Each structure stands twice: as C-alpha cells, then as structure tokens.
Image (cartoon, grey):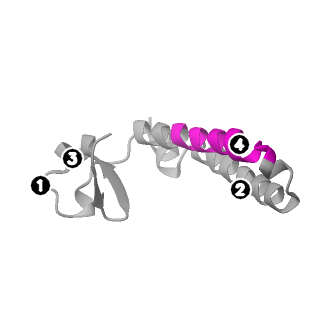
Amino acid sequence: MGPCLRWGDGLLTGLERPILQGMTEETDLPPITDFHRHEVLHVAYIAADVFDRHLLEHRAVQSNADLREKAEAISTLLWDFYQAAGQPSDEAADREADT
C-alpha cells in the first residue's frame, strides 16, 4: 500500500487520494455506502481473528493468568465490535424502509 495522508481523524491510503483531491471540508467526502460498511466488517473480522490466533492462543499468554484474562476481555470486545459492525445501521434501515 502506498503512503498515507490524514483527513480529519481518519487515515486514508494513496488509493483514495484521487477521490479527495480538491476537497477542503470533511463534509465534501462521498457518502458512506454498503461497500464502506462491508469493508469495516471485513477488517473487524481480520483484526479479531489475528488477535485470537497470534496473541490470545499464544502459549506465553495462556501461561500467564493476568495476560490471559486481559486477552480474553480484548477478544470479547473485538468480536462484539465485529457483531455490531454487521448490524444494519439506522441509516441503512431507513433506506430499506423507504423502498
């Protein structure tokens, strides 16, 4: 992935740069679409899965009760976030109700 540039509180890749050229306000950003929501869901899954497989299940974490407890709590929060990201947003529900 190419270099990144900051836009407001977010971090954007070089792939998004052409879309944003000439935009001066955060309100100029394109609207959030189903693709954006799918992307969040996908990355949330990757983050939770990588955390579980590479940290939670690591024997150094499993052999330390304090680390294991903290890792389990983090894992639960990551999977809760994944589940929440998969729920329809109020905006998406409103759109479906209008059709």
Q: Residue 17's x, y, as percent?
A: 21, 47
Q: SS class of the residue under badge 3?
A: helix
Q: Which residue corresponds to mark 3? A: 17
Tell me: 89 left or right of 50: left
Left or right: 21, with 13 as reference point: left
Q: CA distance from mark 4 to mark 1?
A: 41 Å
Q: Please give the label number shown on residue 52.
A: 4
The answer to whether 22 is drawn above or below residue 14 in the figure is: below
- Looking at the rendering, which quadrant does residue 68 occupy? bottom right
Q: Which residue is mark 1?
A: 22
Alpha carbons under labels 2 and 3: distance apart = 33 Å
Which of marks 4 and 3 precedes in the sequence? Answer: 3
Q: Which residues are magenta?
A: 42-59
Q: Quadrant of the C terminus?
A: top left
Task: Tell me if mark 1 has few (under 14), some (14-19) or many (20+) residues whose alpha carbon lies within 10 angstroms of its own.
Answer: few
Cα gap from disc 1 to disc 3, whole angstroms: 10 Å
Q: Earlier in the sequence, mark 1 or mark 3?
A: 3
